[in-house]
Image (cartoon, grey):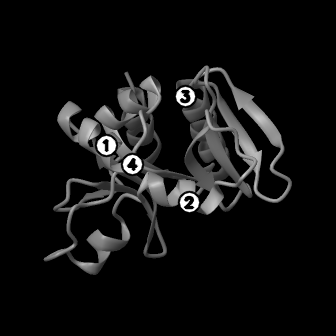
Amino acid sequence: MYEFLEEEIKKIYQDDNKKLRTQTVLYGEIEGSWHTHLHPGLTQEEIEKFELRVGRNFPVTYKEFLSSYNGCYLFDLLRMGGRELDSYKGLTIEEQVRSTVDVQDIQEIHLRKRTPKEHFIFADSLVKNAYYVMDKDEKVLEVDFRTKKVIENYDTLKDFIVQIIQEGKDNIF
């Protein structure tokens, strides 16, 4: 369902990519920094174990995304969490630095007492000064870091990702 993401990234960056031993693919090297990372998806069993560890049932669309990509980093605009690696033992510094950010870490950074319990925090953006949640209807809400007000909403996770891709293209070209 989310394979379109990799297809779009490949169109944008063409042959400018590098695959790590962890199977993470880096795209868009500029001055020694990679601007996009796609992490390989998780199995259904891995997703279920991840939910148990986090202590929460994930939204269906997020689980679908995890089955395609275990988080991603898009155009220096968006950091979408997933399940962190089980071990960093034997990994290069690059493999460690470019690994998935745990969604639980993203939640802990942005979760506040007034955050509605049904909101699932799954991503953030330092560039946009925002974090992203899925509400009970699995709509994606962009929330301002400081004011905690919703500044944008998207009907689906796919719509949200399409918008990030468009913003990424606009910044590159």
Whole-number angstrom distance, CA of label 3 to CA of label 2:
21 Å
- Answer with the quarter of the image where residue 86 lies: bottom left
Front tag of 3 and 4: 4
Question: Which residue is at 20% across, 68% downward?
Answer: 87
> Residue 118 at what x, y percent from top left?
61, 33
Label 3 amino acid?
Leu
Label 4 amino acid?
Val
Front tag of 3 and 1: 1
Question: Which residue is at 26% across, 60% downward?
Answer: 85
Whole-number angstrom distance, CA of label 2 to CA of label 4:
11 Å
| Residue occupied by mark 4 | 54
Please determine whether, in this image, residue 69 is positioned above or below residue 21.
above
> Residue 4 at what x, y percent from top left?
41, 27
| Contact? badges 4 and 1 (CB < 8 Å) | yes
Label 2 amino acid?
Glu
**Residue 49 vs residue 75: left or right?**
left
Whole-number angstrom distance, CA of label 3 to CA of label 1:
23 Å
| Residue occupied by mark 1 | 52
| Contact? badges 1 and 2 (CB < 8 Å) | no
> Residue 21 at what x, y percent from top left?
16, 62
Nearer to us in this view, 105 or 31: 105
Circle 2 crowding by C-alpha within 10 Å: few under 14, some 14–19, many from 20: few
Front tag of 1 and 2: 1
Front tag of 3 and 2: 2
Between discs 2 and 4, the one toward the N terminus = 4
Circle 1 — which element? helix
Circle 2 — which element? helix
The tag on residue 157 is 3
Circle 3 — which element? helix
Label 1 amino acid?
Leu
